[in-house]
Image (cartoon, coloured by chain):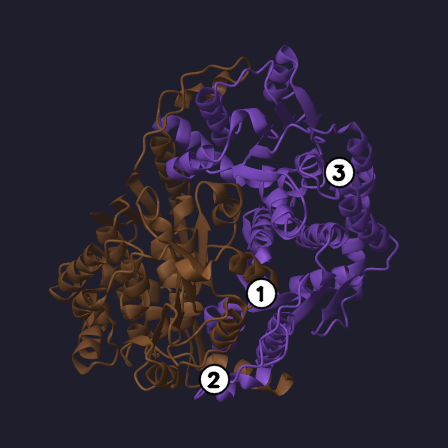
Chain colours: A brown, B purple
């Protein structure tokens, strides 16, 4: 169960909401983006995924859309569940690579190389380093490729009998976590990907049956208040949500920062962790310019009930008001108090309450943000799914070598 | 060695630079903020720090300014150096706490409780939970407090003979990492805090001797272009800089988001990691509104020279242009290429090049950002050092229990 509450005025948004809905319906019908159907189509994938009983670790070699979503889900679901460890080889940072290579033993590790284009320079370079470091035999070692049909990486796989899963060509990297990109490694690692997909399915159905119009209302509100409000802060109340924040930043920033003709459009994602960043970003939210919206994201029931013991320390009695309560209560009430204090400034605020952290809810949360992003892109009449801006840097890079 | 390069027009900034310099000089002379002198005064601290040969781990209980700076330095310097592990108990997240408590054995752990006011609700609550969980004996177990002179926490320490270090009252949490807050745990953990302070000293001297006017120029430029440019992106090219990014966000956001009379002033910090976020935030930088400045931060020499092997994989020959080069070169050239592509859009860009990651450079980097923040606060004529906006939430919190 996830509960969504909007604390801003959603009157007079009906026309915008209809426009956004029609656009998304059209995208789905015409297959302009294929992510809408992943929660259904990926179910068939599950049957095709074999088990790897001799494997203890999975090394994912991939960057950006090929790793952020999987990492987000992994960091949320891994606690107290028996699973294979996933190591993410994503950044071409020499120290980070050395550290992670040191954690990997070839014979107990499944390497999964993920690249939509098949030629991502960081990914292929790290893959080559792994081939050398672990003396990988492409034909015999435990290896999976996940890539677009017909990509150079798939061709390499075919020549070497490497098991390959495809990403649908009409699903972009940042929208791909519910495709093989996320589903294959998470399933092999032992996570409940069936419920992940079921949770996502439910919200897709609700959305297209017009039972989740709050998504359209939020998008319409953001559109209506742009550019006065052009930063969208996600304030997530759990340390486990740090990688979900990163995934949100990619989805939002890369989808909603686009030229429309000569005009530069852009909603800037900013993500923080509560309660830590109450001691950091909150001051700016409260006293700074009213140029931001804030979404509070909280978990109602954590998996444990560690209490703040009823210890009264001399001189520190003023902290005793939380004694006997759980940390679950403390972090949730901190979220509530901070939300009230931000609202009091006139900042547009909404709240997403996850009942508990489980696969079903994570699937819903993923698709919620994807639908919201699409609705915004449609209202701004930009191409939500491409990223032409990153090409120049790639061209310059080849010149520098 | 750190090299600073500004790629924007710094003409006509002289008057603003003088104003900022005079303000900071005045702050230092009058002791309005005491952080300017920490690199010198903390040298005396080093002699007072005993060694703890029987201790293997340090558990820091602290949040915000009491942990972010230490964490930033720790994550940068910990690689390949023999040191005691530091565990940060910062967020009142029940799962995170449980995970971290499970990594701690009482008899080999030194607990350091850090709270400037001495009554930070998260910190004291976690401390109480630790007392119960580990059956801590205040009078006999390995315990240090770091707090303001005369705080309730210091009083508790005095009654129980707990070793206490003070934070100078005129040094705020987010400016405190070079006080006992960072120096005590990092020294005990085995890091070279003497060079950390020496690196910071050098830049303080250079700044007040007018040999680091690039700091004033950057602040003046940002001031001059506000509010057209009100987001300041730090793009850090190493996974090890993720916690430095968090520290920057706190320092910048909490210092530079302030009411000035009825007016709301605010520079918004945003921080990303390269090359990962080239696949995330870069598109928005390139095609989105020109409302951001970008600072690229890179490490010229990493501690290892892992190479991209000269393996040519069939079909993937287009990735061979990096073959034989080191990852050190790849990540640095990615930074360069991205910087060029961002510059080409007319985005104000500057570059900070750290020669290599060592204590001296980290000390300089810390003080660089503190001086820059102070210069900006002075130009905006706001109080850089308080955080009145966070009080309302604290009041609401007590009402919710």
Residue beneath the point at 55% across and 67% down: B274
Task: Tell me which chain the residue with mark 2 is part of.
Answer: B
Q: For the residues carrying marks 3 and 1, which lies nearer the camera in this image? A: 1
Q: What residue is pinned by disc 2?
A: B313
Tell me where residue A197 appears, x and y as whole percent. 20, 60
Tell me where residue B347 appears, x and y as whole percent. 59, 74
- For this view, does B108 lie left or right of residue B46? left
Mark before the other along the chain sequence, 3 or 2: 3
- Among the 4 quarters of the image, the one containing residue A26: bottom left
Q: Which residue is the extreme one toward the left?
A: A209
Q: What residue is pinned by disc 1?
A: A93
Could you confirm whether marks 2 and 1 are on the same chain? no
Residue beneath the point at 49% across and 72% down: A131
Calculate the distance from the C-alpha at mark 3 to the C-alpha at mark 2: 58 Å
Q: Which mark is residue B34?
A: 3
Q: For the residues carrying marks 2 and 1, which lies nearer the camera in this image? A: 2
Q: Are marks 3 and 1 in contact (CB under 8 Å)?
A: no
Calculate the distance from the C-alpha at mark 3 to the C-alpha at mark 1: 36 Å
Secondary structure under tag 1 reads loop
């Amino acid at each position: 169960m996830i509960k969504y509450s909007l604390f801003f005025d959603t009157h007079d948004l009906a026309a915008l909401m209809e426009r956004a809905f029609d656009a998304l319906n059209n995208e789905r019908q015409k297959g302009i983006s294929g992510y809408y159907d992943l929660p259904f189509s990926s179910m068939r994938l599950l049957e095709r995924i074999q088990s790897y009983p001799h494997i203890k670790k999975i090394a994912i070699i991939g960057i950006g859309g090929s790793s952020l979503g999987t990492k987000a889900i992994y960091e949320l679901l891994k606690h107290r569940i028996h699973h294979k460890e996933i190591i993410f080889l994503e950044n071409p940072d020499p120290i980070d690579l050395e550290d992670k290579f040191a954690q990997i033993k070839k014979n107990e590790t499944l390497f999964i190389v993920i690249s939509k284009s098949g030629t991502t320079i960081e990914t292929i370079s790290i893959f080559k380093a792994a081939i050398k470091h672990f003396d990988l035999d492409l034909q015999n070692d435990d290896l999976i490729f996940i890539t677009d049909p017909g990509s150079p990486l798939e061709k390499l796989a075919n020549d070497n009998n490497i098991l390959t899963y495809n990403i649908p060509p009409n699903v972009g990297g940042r929208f791909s976590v519910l495709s093989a990109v996320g589903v294959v490694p998470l399933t092999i690692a032992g996570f409940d990907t069936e419920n992940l997909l079921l949770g996502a399915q439910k919200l897709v159905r609700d959305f297209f049956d017009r039972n989740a119009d709050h998504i359209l209302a939020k998008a319409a509100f953001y559109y209506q208040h742009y550019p006065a409000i052009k930063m969208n802060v996600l304030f997530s109340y759990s340390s486990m949500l740090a990688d979900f924040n990163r995934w949100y930043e990619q989805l939002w920033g890369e989808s909603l920062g686009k030229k429309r003709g000569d005009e530069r459009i852009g909603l800037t994602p900013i993500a923080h962790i509560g309660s830590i960043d109450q001691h950091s970003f909150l001051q700016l939210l409260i006293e700074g310019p009213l140029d931001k919206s804030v979404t509070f994201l909280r978990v109602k029931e954590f998996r444990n009930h560690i209490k703040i013991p009823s210890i009264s320390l001399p001189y520190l009695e003023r902290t005793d008001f939380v004694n006997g309560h759980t940390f679950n209560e403390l972090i949730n009430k901190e979220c509530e108090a901070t939300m009230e204090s931000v609202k009091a400034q006139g900042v547009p605020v909404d709240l997403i309450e996850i009942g508990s952290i489980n696969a079903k809810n994570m699937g819903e949360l993923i698709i919620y943000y994807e639908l919201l992003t699409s609705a915004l892109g449609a209202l701004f009449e930009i191409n939500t799914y491409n990223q032409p801006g990153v090409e120049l840097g790639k061209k310059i890079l080849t010149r520098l070598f």
